[in-house]
């Protein structure tokens, strides 16, 4: 069975990745997980300078997932180049650097620092960051800013450029089209949803920032719908994310239109979740006589109800 696929000249071993922020920089879990069995690692978000992130409490468990308000804490791009990249030299899977920034200029500076690094195979751009020049509003909810960031970064690299889109908009397909029009090679759908939790004994929010990003099984139906909406709108590949814990979940995303999947919150429960998912996917394909995982992409069989769904997208 063929598991590999190509994106802008980069060959990925398979279509199962680990999501940014849930797997560190890769080296932290190398003793627990056979990284060579992954399609790729989306690194923890990298900014130009180190960031401490938000004050605690930064994580809260929910009934079907988790809320986080880490605040993009990271070691900064230079320390990543000096300390983390060397630890990944012998790893067979791809390394995709996730970039976060508070200005267009910072996005460009981080990418320019990473682009010459041979071990960095491509970039995933987190546009859910606050634009400090515009009062803290998220880049990802501004169509013109998504277009501008994609356009500026495309000028600066020949490596795969993947735009990670926020679901906290009315029509994610519009943002996917904007990214595609400015040269993105793929989109990641979706980032976390805005949520909150309250401690009923203290009557205070469980997160220091009051609201945070909701991830895990709770958001899977939403993520699937967003992937389907995006698949109908663009021709570039989609990395499906959101509540993927098992191989069955992954197959749903493929059928809805994802070309690859990312395992996120499940990594906190089982660091080997992505490898187990990959193995389950292979067994499914063997059982159903599927020669290439690409045969599953967008292969959902739908009746006339699809037109009803599309009418409100």
Image (cartoon, rainbow, N blue to C red):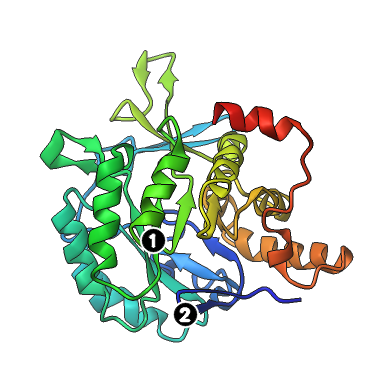
Q: Which mark is residue 83?
A: none
For disc 1, the marked residue is 184
Q: Residues within 10 Å of mark 2 (few under 14, many from 20)?
A: few
Residue 153, compared with residue 138, is above or below; it is below
Asked where in the image residue 207 lies, by quadrant, the reply is top left
* Quadrant including the N terminus: bottom right
Q: Residue most toward the left?
A: 133
Report helix, strand or loop for mark 2: loop
- In the displayed structure, does residue 158 sit left or right of residue 260? left
Q: Nearer the viewer, residue 128 or 197?
A: 128
Residue 9 is labelled as 2
- Identified at 32% across, 37% down, the residue is 141
Q: Inspect this view and state whether residue 100 appears.
A: no
Horizontal relation, residue 259 to residue 93: left or right: right
Looking at the image, residue 300 sits to the left or right of residue 207; the answer is right
Q: Are marks 2 and 1 in contact (CB under 8 Å)?
A: no
């Amino acid at each position: 069975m063929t598991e590999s696929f190509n994106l802008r000249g980069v060959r990925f071993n398979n279509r199962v990745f680990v999501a940014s922020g849930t797997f560190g920089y890769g080296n932290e879990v190398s003793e627990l997980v056979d990284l060579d069995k992954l399609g790729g690692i989306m690194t923890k978000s990298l900014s130009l300078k180190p960031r401490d992130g938000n004050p605690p409490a930064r994580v809260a468990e929910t009934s079907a997932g988790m809320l986080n308000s880490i605040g993009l804490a990271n070691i900064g791009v230079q320390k990543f180049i000096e300390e983390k990249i060397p630890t990944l030299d012998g790893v067979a899977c791809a390394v995709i650097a996730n970039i976060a920034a508070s200005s267009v200029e910072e996005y460009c500076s981080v990418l320019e620092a990473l682009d010459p690094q041979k071990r960095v195979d491509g970039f995933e751009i987190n546009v859910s960051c606050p634009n400090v020049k515009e009062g803290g509003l998220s880049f990802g909810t501004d169509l013109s800013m998504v277009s501008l960031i994609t356009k500026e970064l495309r000028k600066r690299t020949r490596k795969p450029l993947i735009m990670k889109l926020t679901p906290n908009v009315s029509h994610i397909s519009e943002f996917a089209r904007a990214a595609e029009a400015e040269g993105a090679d793929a989109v990641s759908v979706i980032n976390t949803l805005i949520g909150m939790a309250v401690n009923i004994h203290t009557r205070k929010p469980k997160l220091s920032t009051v609201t945070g990003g909701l991830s895990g099984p709770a958001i899977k139906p939403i993520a699937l719908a967003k992937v389907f909406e995006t698949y109908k709108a663009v021709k570039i590949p989609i990395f499906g994310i959101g509540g993927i814990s098992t191989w069955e979940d992954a197959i749903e995303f493929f059928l809805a239109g994802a070309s690859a999947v990312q395992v996120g919150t499940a990594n906190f429960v089982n660091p080997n979740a992505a490898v187990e998912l990959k193995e389950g996917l292979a067994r499914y394909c063997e059982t159903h006589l599927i020669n290439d995982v690409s045969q599953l992409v967008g292969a959902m069989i739908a009746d006339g109800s699809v037109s009803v769904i599309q009418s409100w997208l």
